[in-house]
Image (cartoon, rainbow, N blue to C red):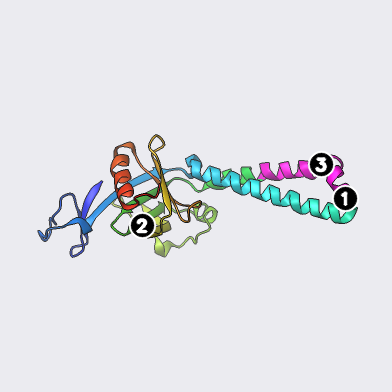
Amino acid sequence: MLVYFCPKCQRQNPQPFCNACNRSLGNPSIRYVWEDSRAPLTDVTRIGLLLRVTASAVAVTVIVMLMIEYILSGNAAFTTFFKSTGIPAAALGLGITLIGLGLLVLLFQGRESVQYMLDPKGVLKRTWIEPTRLKCWTRMIRYDKAAFQKNSEGRPFLLAHEQYLVWQDTARYKLAPRAGRITLYRPYAFVFMVLHLPRHEYDGAAEMVAAKLKNKR
């Protein structure tokens, strides 16, 4: 949703003037804000990261064991390694185990509410959870009751993660309208931030991202 932020009153307005102080608000006050709620287990970006990490761990394990086999048996290691040792089966088992553990961690993280804001300088992403000790443990954050904040319904929420990416530091972006996703990279090949949007918010946010990141697709 397009809003206009009044720095004096610290409030967002749906029109280019402040309802509280009647101050006129120009282009520097423009923000695009929205919220999204989802379970981490349904996020294809995280599943993809889990698969890449697992593949890397298995590859490193196989290479290390192959080096050890070469030290012990010399050149014969390259011809007998995948036939006479149990390493390939063990590597496959390691991969399946890591994927299973990763999926369990994502499952136990529970549902999360994410707030997004596009402003003239960059993108702010805040992830909130309804805190339990298990959710905090699987996210590797502290279960701190003093940090809990209550919403309008009186339910406690905890800020689990916060990211801010400056427009000028963004190397490129990728739009996926059908998936309702905008991916921001920093550097060029590293996924720094993923924005998930409901269908009715996508076009407005995509236009603002495109305007800020010209020639960076």
* Disc assigned to residue 167: 2
Q: Position of residue 53 (x, y in %)?
A: 61, 49
Q: Amino acid at mark 3?
A: Phe
The residue that label 3 is drawn on is 82
Q: Residue at x 88, y 55 (%)?
A: 72
**Magenta segment includes 85:** yes
Image spot of residue 156 (x, y percent): 37, 54
Which callout, 3 or 2, points at the residue further toward the start of the chain? 3
Stretch of the chain drawn in magenta: 75-97
Q: Residues within 10 Å of mark 2 (few under 14, many from 20)?
A: some
Q: Are marks 3 and 1 in contact (CB under 8 Å)?
A: no
Coordinates of residue 87 in the picture (x, y in percent): 79, 45
Question: Which residue is denoted by mark 1 in the rendering?
Answer: 75
Q: Secondary structure at mark 3?
A: helix
Q: Gap in Å between the C-alphas at discs 2 and 1?
A: 53 Å
Dot 2 or dot 1, earlier in sequence:
1
Q: Nearer the viewer, mark 3 or mark 1?
A: 1
Residue 153 part of the magenta-drawn span: no
Q: Is residue 34 above or below residue 140?
A: above
Q: Is residue 119 above or below residue 175?
A: below
Q: Amino acid at mark 2?
A: Trp
